[in-house]
Structures are given as C-alpha cells and as structure tokens.
Image: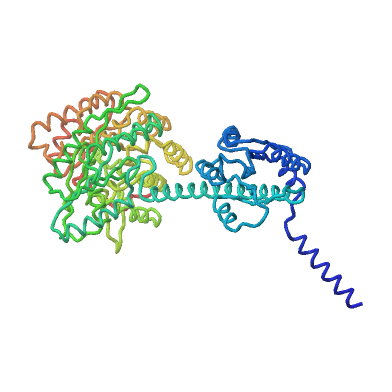
C-alpha cells in the first residue's frame, strides 16, 4: 500500500513538473513545417531522395538545387524588406563548387543571411573528429552521416529549424533592446541638455550661467583678470507678444538668440534668463572694452526690425553690465543680481541704453524703499493703522470754514506718523493705492454722517481709481447707508491723473456727478495742457497749484497767471481755491483777484478731529 501511494505521489510530482515545462504547441510544429528549405547537392537522385523524405514528414516548402549558383540565387531572391525567407540550407559534400566554409563566409556578409542554419551531409559513414571540428567551426548547425534514413534526417531538419526560430527571436529581442537603449540614450541626452539649456532658443540657462560665473570668479581672483556680465532686456517685448500672440513672441526670441550668437564669440557664455531677458558672460575683458562691446550691441538692436504677419516692429534693448574682479569676493548670485539691477536702472532711465552697475544708483534705492514699505502698507490696511487729518478751507465771501480736505496719514511703529509722500508713491508702484482710496472713501463718509450738514469734505483720489467700476458702486452704497447729501462730497483729482486716461476718467466723473457729487481739479496750472482740457473736463472747482501762490506777492508773473486762472474759471462757472496761503498779504491779493476759497496755514493747519453735530 505504501509503495502504491509513493508511486502515485511521484507520478503527480512528475506531471506537475511536466505541466510547468513549456511545451511545443501544434501551431509551432505547423509553422516549422512551412519553413523554406534549400537542399543543395551535385547528385540529382540524392537531392530528390531528401526532398521526398521531408515531404513525407510534412514539410511543404522545399527547393532542390545542384550547384552553388542555385544556392545563391535562392538566397538573393528570398530577400524582402531586409528579411530572407530561406530558413535552412542542407549542403551535401558532393557539391564541389561550394563548401560549408565558402557558404558561411558569404552569408556572414549580410545581416539577412547571417542567422540561417546549415546542415552538412558528409560522404563518410563513420565518425571523423577533424571533420566535425572543421564544419562546426564554419557555422554548420548539424553534421549528418550517410546512409540517410527517415528516422534521422527529418528530426535533424526540425531541430535545425527550431534553432533558427530561436535565433530569430533572440535577434529580434536584441534589436528591440538596442532600439530601447538608443531611445533611452536619446532621452538621457535630451534630459542632460535640458538641465543646462533653454528649450526654445537652445541657449544655456541660468544653471549653466551660475556654473560659469563661479569659474569666472575663481579665475579673476587667482589670475588678476576681469570679466563682464551683460544683462539684456528687450524693450517693449510685451507689446508684440500681446498684439501678435505667443507664437510671434517665440519667433522673435529665437531670432534674437541667433543675433546674439553671431555677435559674441563661441567661447562666451550665452544664456536666456527669463521671458525676454538674456545674459552673456565674457571672460578676460577690461571695463573699457566691455563698455564698447555693450554699446555695439545696443547699436545693433537700435531700431531692430521684426516682421510678422505683414506687421513690422522696431525694438531696442536695455543692457545692464557688471564688471567682475576677484577682489570683490562676490558670489555668482550677487553678480547676476547686480547685472539685473543695472538693467533695471537702464530701463528706468529711458530704455535703449547701457548702464554699468553702481552701488549709488538711486533707482535701486527707490526700489529697495518700495520693497521695505510695501509690507508696512499692507499691515497698516489690515490693522487699521491709517488715519485722517482735516485741513480747513476758508470761504472768502463768508469768512467761514465751509470745507475740510481729508489728508491721509499712516501710523508706524512706536506711534511714528508718516505723511503721504512717504507711502503714496510706493502704494502706486506696488498696486496698493486702490485699497487706500477705498479706505479713505469709507471712513470719510462715516465721519461726514456725524458732522454738520453745512460742512463739506474734499477727498483726494488717485487717477487710476476712476478706471475701477467698483468705485461707483461703493460711493452709491455709502450715500445710501450714511444719508450724506451728495453735494457735500467733493472728490479731488490731479490734472496729471485726469489727462493720463482722459476719456475713461471723464466718463466716471460724469457718472458720479450724476449722483450729485462735486469734483475739484487739483494742482491746476502745473501742466502745459491745463486750459485745453479745462473746457472739456466736468469739474466744479479749480485748485490753483501752490507753486503759484507761495511767492505770489513778489512775483508779477505768478500774479498775472493766478489772476487769469481765476478769471477763466469764473467765466466757465467754476469756483477757485488757492492753496498754500500762509500770509495775510497773500490773502489780500487773492481776495482782490476774486478767489472763492483759500487753504493754508493762515487759515488753519491739519487737525485730527472735525466739529461734530
């Protein structure tokens, strides 16, 4: 009983192992039987005998030839799409004009023939060790001896064809691996290139520039040389990019990159830094030569023509330059930052120019001032650290204060009070001025609701706020919520702001006047176009620029101009306000000219509170 059980277990294990082994399917055998076989021998009867044995065994595609020319013809005609359809050659030693060695040498010359197996038939019926080594050394797959039998020949052919199939699969897999490896190498090369180069222009990128700068700093320090970094910014690139689209912008960037390649030496490091910014590092160059090269580049781009969709654009560049000397002991980041700052200064001073970096550049001091003040302004808005002061405006006719002008202040650390000149320019540059405008409107209306209805308030607004449609909605809501009479509200806008966006500003002013609010044109007379715009701009009050008032008593020209302003304003039905009135003599003179209101220290200084109801 134990023996039977053990035998069954062994049988089950053998079956399991056999099932795990890969078996040859019927389709595989059928494919091998359709393989193309060429039998070559000088003896016709031997060739015919072998053909018959193979056909009886199921092989269907057999060709017999009797000379070397027939073998080569079958090989040549069998090539199609870089593949030969001959799967096996049976070569009889009776074929005296071609040996296995000759055939293999010819077949190894072509990839299409290299994997085709050869079965060699010997004339000897006994083992010849030397012959075996010779034939196998010449690429013979199998060596068969006479006499040929049906039991030995077809199985040898089947084995050789199976070997051929395996060779083809291995070769195909090797080609696939080679293709995959080539693709990976291309991808790796592209990746390595993209790490240090710009995809659009093919120039180096910032990472490559920083590496070159580090090397340049080392060289200048150790060999007492100097280098120059050019920071190049395209002027008005945004105009073209917005007008024609990004495709046009990309085309221009590539064209500029090619222009830079032709201008600088191949040993110089050319880099695309940003959207429309480039940098070029030139080693071993003195400052004078670098300035000449930078000016030459600027001249090259002065009036630079770029045509797209039948439109012609004229561009220029602003160039910032930083001279690198070893004694500065700077980092690559500092050098790049200084060159960028020099470029910023060049653009600020009018564009289309070259500027050499200097620690004394006032533009950078202004920029740093803005960077320092921006978070303070945001914090003041969030923490309610803004406050209003009020300066009285005196009516000449009634000798009473009828208006107060809102003047904004900002409370800093430890109670420090900052005036508009400290933070308003920064707010305008950093996009915070509208938030301040809305803050002033909200608080001014709330204060007016607690004041006598005989008192009006003038509110200063920035020019661009009149392009914001939210302004109208806010004022309309505040009028409804507070119950303030609209004619008590006077909005002040400077002449310069009114002119910069004349049509849009005029439209908003007319809408707000439709609510009943009034408007004053501040700093009137400061611009050259004052009178030409006055007859078209819908304002109720003209505030004469203080520059004409401070020395009015002693300056006959100011007297003539101020009198003419008052007369013209009255002829147009508008009231006038004279600012900066500090002396009674000035007051008397203005009164004789017919001015309606005066404002200044003679009447009253700004105060923190207003008279309440």
Can residue 345 be seen by looking at this rendering? Answer: yes
On the picture, is 340 further left or further right than 582?
right
Q: Pick out the residue farthest to the top.
A: 310
Question: Foreground: 164 or 216?
Answer: 164
Rendered position, 465 above or below 613: above
Q: Pick out the residue farthest to the right.
A: 1
Question: Foreground: 90 or 304?
Answer: 90
Task: Pinpoint residue 467: horizontal percent, then vertical percent.
Answer: 38, 35
Task: Pinpoint residue 608: horizontal percent, then vertical percent.
Answer: 30, 53
On the picture, is 183 further left or further right than 467?
right
Colour scheme in use: rainbow
Residue at the image position 62 percent from the left and 51 percent from the top: 141
Residue at the image position 43 percent from the left and 41 percent from the top: 484
Question: Foreground: 111 or 204?
Answer: 111
Residue 395: name its quadrant: top left
On the picture, is 38 further left or further right than 279?
right
| Picture quarter with the N terminus | bottom right
Can residue 455 be seen by looking at this rendering? Answer: no
Q: Pick out the residue farthest to the bottom.
A: 2
Rendered position, 41 above or below 422: above
Task: Pinpoint residue 432: horizontal percent, then vertical percent.
Answer: 36, 47
Task: Pinpoint residue 548: horizontal percent, then vertical percent.
Answer: 15, 36
On the picture, is 532 further left or further right than 147?
left
How many numbered marks, from 0 up? 0
Question: Foreground: 139 or 577?
Answer: 139
């Amino acid at each position: 009983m134990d023996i039977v059980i053990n035998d069954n277990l062994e049988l089950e294990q053998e079956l399991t192992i056999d099932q795990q082994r890969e078996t040859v399917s019927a389709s595989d055998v059928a494919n091998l039987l359709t393989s193309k076989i060429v039998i070559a021998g000088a003896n016709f009867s031997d060739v015919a005998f072998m053909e018959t044995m193979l056909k009886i065994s199921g092989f269907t595609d057999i060709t017999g030839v009797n000379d070397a020319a027939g073998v080569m013809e079958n090989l040549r005609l069998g090539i199609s799409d870089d593949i030969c359809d001959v799967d096996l050659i049976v070569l009889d030693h009776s074929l005296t004009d071609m040996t296995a060695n000759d055939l293999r040498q010819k077949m190894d010359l072509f990839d299409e023939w290299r994997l085709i197996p050869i079965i060699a038939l010997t004339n000897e019926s006994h083992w010849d060790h030397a012959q075996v080594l010779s034939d196998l050394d010449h690429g013979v797959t199998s060596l068969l001896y006479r006499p040929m039998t049906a039991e030995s020949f077809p199985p040898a052919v089947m084995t050789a064809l199976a070997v051929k199939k395996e060779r083809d699969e291995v070769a195909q897999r090797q080609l696939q691996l080679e293709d995959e490896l080539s693709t990976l190498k291309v991808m790796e090369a592209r990746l390595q290139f993209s790490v240090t180069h710009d995809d659009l222009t093919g120039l180096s990128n910032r990472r490559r520039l920083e590496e070159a700068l580090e090397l340049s700093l080392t060289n200048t320090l150790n060999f007492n040389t100097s280098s120059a970094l050019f920071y190049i910014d395209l002027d008005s690139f945004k105009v073209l990019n917005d007008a024609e689209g990004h495709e046009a912008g990309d085309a221009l960037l590539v064209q500029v990159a090619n222009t830079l390649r032709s201008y600088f030496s191949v040993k110089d490091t050319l880099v695309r830094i940003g959207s429309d910014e480039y940098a070029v590092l030139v080693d071993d160059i003195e400052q004078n030569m670098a300035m000449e090269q930078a000016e030459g580049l600027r001249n090259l781009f002065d009036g630079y023509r770029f045509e797209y969709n039948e439109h012609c654009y004229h561009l220029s560049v602003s160039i910032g330059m930083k001279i690198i000397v070893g004694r500065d002991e700077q980092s690559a980041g500092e050098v790049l930052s200084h060159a960028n700052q020099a470029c910023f200064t060049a653009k600020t001073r009018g564009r289309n120019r070259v500027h050499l970096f200097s620690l004394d550049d006032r533009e950078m001091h202004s920029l740093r001032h803005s960077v320092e003040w921006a978070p303070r302004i945001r914090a003041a808005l969030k923490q309610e650290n803004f406050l209003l002061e009020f300066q009285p405006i005196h009516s000449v006719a009634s000798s009473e204060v009828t208006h107060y002008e809102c003047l904004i202040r900002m409370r800093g650390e430890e109670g420090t009070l900052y005036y508009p000149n400290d933070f308003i320019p920064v707010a305008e540059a950093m996009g915070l001025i509208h938030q301040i405008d809305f803050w002033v409107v909200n608080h001014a209306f709330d204060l007016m609701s607690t004041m006598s209805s005989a008192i009006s308030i003038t509110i200063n607004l920035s020019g661009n706020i009149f392009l914001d449609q939210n302004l109208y909605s806010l004022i309309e809501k505040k009028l409804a919520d507070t119950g303030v009479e609209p004619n008590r509200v006077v909005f002040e806008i400077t002449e310069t702001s009114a002119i910069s966006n004349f049509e849009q500003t005029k439209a908003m002013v007319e809408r707000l006047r439709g609510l009943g609010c009034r408007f004053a044109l501040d700093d009137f007379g400061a611009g050259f176009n004052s009178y030409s715009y006055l007859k078209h701009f819908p304002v109720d009050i003209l505030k004469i620029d203080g520059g004409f008032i401070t020395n009015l008593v002693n300056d006959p020209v100011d007297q003539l101009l101020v009198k003419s302003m008052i007369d013209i304003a009255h002829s147009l039905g508008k009231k006038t306000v004279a600012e900066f009135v500090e002396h009674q003599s000035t007051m008397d003179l203005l009164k004789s000219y017919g001015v309606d209101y005066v404002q200044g220290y003679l009447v009253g200084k700004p105060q923190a509170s207003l008279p309440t109801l």
